[in-house]
Image: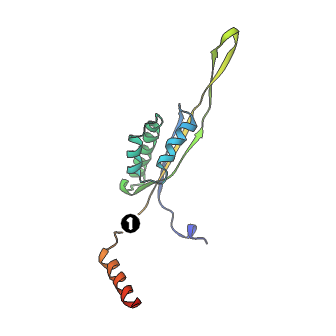
Amino acid sequence: MSDATAQEELPRAFARARYVRATPMKVRRVVELIKGRSAEEALAVLRYAPQAASEPVAKVLASAVANAENNLELDPETLWVSQAYVDEGPTLKRFRPRAQGRAYRIRKRTSHITVEVESRPKPEPVKKAAAKSRKSSAKRSAS
């Protein structure tokens, strides 16, 4: 067994928004900002991100946190964004009239946004006194 399968799976919750009227390329730029961050930090980043796509991504993240809290009874402070990705939805095709009877196709793209959060245990604070005593004992043994 590898280490990944041997260790216990962390509890996960996800949320998905489908048919969001934003292009997948633009939404992916925003999603890259939150991958691997804590849920609280990711929401703060999205709140001040200038991109228009940050609003639907923030809604999906908030929904994933609420799902974890209510359905799995997880502590919101221990949640991290484990996965976040954007898939392409159906494209709405429209036509724009042009000169001399021509028409250009306008593609209104849609996105499916998925955010997955997992609960990681809080790291234990390291005691400074223990670390200091190890350093001083290492110095004594070296001399």
Q: Which residue is drawn at 51% across and 67% down?
A: 8
Task: Classify 103 as above or below 122.
Answer: above
Q: What is the residue that sits farthest to the left in this orientation? A: 129
Q: Which residue is drawn at 36% across and 89% down?
A: 140
Quarter placement of the N terminus: bottom right
Q: How many labels does the image show?
A: 1
Q: Which residue is drawn at 39% across and 55% down?
A: 73
Quarter of the image for residue 94 reads top right
Q: Where is residue 116 in the image (x, y as percent from the top left)?
A: 49, 50
Q: Is residue 105 left or right of residue 48?
A: right
User: Considering the numbered disc 1 on the image, is that residue within a helix, a strand or a loop?
Assistant: loop
Residue at the disc numbered 1: 123
- Mark 1 surroundings: few (<14), some (14-19) or many (≥20) residues within 10 A: few
Q: Position of residue 111 (x, y in %)?
A: 56, 36
Quarter of the image for residue 128 reads bottom left
Quarter of the image for residue 109 reads top right
Q: What is the residue that sits farthest to the front in this orientation? A: 143
Task: Classify 141 as above or below 4.
Answer: below
Q: Where is residue 124 in the image (x, y as percent from the top left)?
A: 36, 69
